[in-house]
Every structure is written in structure tokens, then in C-alpha cells.
Image (cartoon, rainbow, N blue to C red):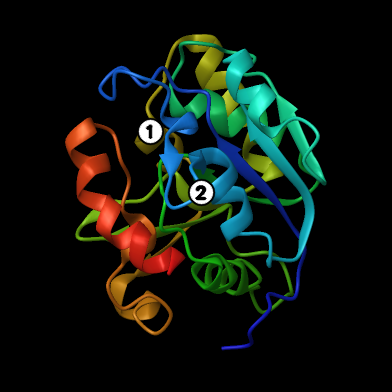
């Protein structure tokens, strides 16, 4: 695999959730050893990507403040607060001219090489040279990784229609798209342990990932 995806992406880091199970704002969790906010850690881990724009979706003023002034980072509010991950995808796509890599802020071990692989898949065309996919979504341990995936701007009207009708299921959204699911076997070459897909929703999960973060920082 080429080390750099050939098309620019909009990177959308979704930090708009309520973090109810964590009991505190996940985006601001301190990442060892320097204690930088998790949302900043995720941004820095993916800086090597070829990006047309870097967008953070945040409804919490403290999260917006944490990323304010960082080079090339644009912070936007969720237009549909309280509507879950689908609303975060919509907020990111509204800023995007083409493909967006949508990543949850709660994935501390994200790997730019995985996004590069997904971006290469997104460029697949049919015999007429027409784009084949609306979304490129990893399928890890039989679970769709909807917040670690690529979505095309053309899917935004579908999301907005769903949000207006109160349909908030990301899976229902995918059912209306041309989706290319990327398997573990395809990803294993760049992330054998699938660590990029580890997310933290509870204090216990955050504690469990600490040794891996210390290893990464070391």
C-alpha cells in the first residue's frame, strides 16, 4: 500500500456526545504522559494525513476552547444536538466538499495508516469511471465501525432527511447507501491488533487503555 492516500480528506473528529457513561467529558480526558486532552491527541495522531480541512464537532464550550487556536482546526457546533452520532456525521459533512473521515474523539489509538487504506478503497470506480461507494466502513469483530469510517458529502441530504423525521440510527443510514465494508483481513496489514478501533466509554475502559497509551508515547 502506498504510504499516502492520493486524495485529500476532510478529517471530522466528533466530540459532540454527552459522555454520560464516562461521567465526564471524554474529549478532555488527559492522555499520558503530558496530559493533553484526548481530542487533541486524536487530532495530532492523524496530522500526517493529506487533509483539505480538519473539523472538530463540539457542543461543549470547554472542548471548543481546548482546540481553539490550533493550526488548521475548525470547530463547529452540532446543528441537531441530542440526536446522537448521526448528527455529528451531518455536522462534519456540512463542511466537506467530498470525502470525510469521521472519527470519534474517544478512540485514543487511532492509526493514520488505517484511514489511508480506507481512502484508497473510497477511490474505487466502476467501468465507466463513476465513484462506486457512498461510504467506506470497517467491519471489525462483526461490528460496523461507523465512527471510524469515510462518508461522501453526497450522503448529507439522506442524513438530514432522517434527522428531520426523527430517525437517528446510523445503521438505517448505511442501509440507504452504497457501502464498501472493509474487513479485518484487509486492515491487518496496517493494524494487526485492530487497536485503532478501541474506544473508551467508561472509566474502566479508560483505565484499561492506559498501558497501551504509555507504550505508544514511549
Left or right: where 57 falls relative to 201:
right
Foreground: disc 1 or disc 2: 2
Query: Around disc 1, counting alpha carbons within 10 Å, would you say few (fewer than 14), some (14 to 19), or many (20 or more)?
Result: few
Question: In the current view of this chain or complex, which residue is farthest to the bottom?
Answer: 1
Tell me what residue is drawn at x 63 percent, y 84 percent: 3
Judged from the image, the secondary structure of the residue bearing numbered disc 1 is: helix
Q: Are marks 1 and 2 in contact (CB under 8 Å)?
A: no
Which residue is nearer to you in this view: 144 or 174? 144
Query: Around disc 2, counting alpha carbons within 10 Å, would you say few (fewer than 14), some (14 to 19), or many (20 or more)?
Result: few
Tell me what residue is drawn at x 51 percent, y 48 percent: 34
Instruction: Name the spot of residue 87 as percent of width and height, x first.
Output: 54, 23
Tell me what residue is drawn at x 41 percent, y 67 percent: 216
- Residue 95 visible to an observer of this rendering: no
Is 136 above or below relative to 117?
Answer: above
Instruction: Name the spot of residue 174 as percent of width and height, x first.
Output: 43, 42
Left or right: where 180 falls relative to 188:
right
Tell me what residue is drawn at x 31 percent, y 78 percent: 192
Left or right: where 206 falls relative to 149:
left
Question: In the current view of this chain or complex, which residue is farthest to the front?
Answer: 34
Q: Which mark is residue 212?
A: none
Say which residue label 1 marks.
172
Judged from the image, the secondary structure of the residue bearing numbered disc 2 is: loop
Is 56 above or below relative to 21?
Answer: below
Whichever of labels 1 and 2 marks the residue nearer the N terminus, that label is 2
Left or right: where 185 falls relative to 152:
left
Say which residue label 2 marks.
34
Amino acid at each position: 500500500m502506498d504510504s499516502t492516500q492520493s486524495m485529500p480528506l476532510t478529517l471530522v473528529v466528533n466530540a459532540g456526545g454527552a459522555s454520560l457513561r464516562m461521567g465526564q467529558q471524554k474529549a478532555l480526558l488527559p492522555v499520558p504522559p503530558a496530559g493533553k486532552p484526548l481530542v487533541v491527541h486524536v487530532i495530532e495522531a492523524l496530522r500526517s494525513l493529506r487533509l483539505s480541512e480538519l473539523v472538530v464537532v463540539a457542543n461543549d464550550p470547554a472542548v471548543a476552547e481546548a482546540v481553539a487556536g490550533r493550526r488548521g482546526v475548525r470547530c463547529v457546533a452540532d446543528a441537531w444536538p441530542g440526536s446522537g452520532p448521526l448528527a455529528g456525521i451531518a455536522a462534519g459533512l456540512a463542511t466537506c466538499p467530498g470525502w470525510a473521515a469521521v472519527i470519534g474523539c474517544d478512540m485514543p489509538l487511532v492509526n493514520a495508516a488505517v484511514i489511508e487504506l480506507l481512502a484508497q478503497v473510497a477511490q474505487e470506480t466502476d467501468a465507466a469511471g463513476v465513484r462506486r461507494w457512498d461510504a467506506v466502513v470497517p467491519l471489525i469483530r462483526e461490528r460496523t465501525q461507523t465512527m471510524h469510517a469515510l462518508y461522501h458529502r453526497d450522503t448529507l441530504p439522506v442524513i438530514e432527511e432522517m434527522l428531520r423525521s426523527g430517525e437517528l440510527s446510523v445503521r438505517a443510514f448505511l442501509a440507504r447507501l452504497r457501502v464498501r465494508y472493509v474487513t479485518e483481513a484487509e486492515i491487518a496489514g496496517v493494524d494487526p491488533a485492530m487497536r485503532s478501533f478501541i474506544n473508551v466509554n467508561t472509566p474502566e475502559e479508560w483505565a484499561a487503555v492506559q498501558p497501551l497509551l504509555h507504550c505508544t508515547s514511549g
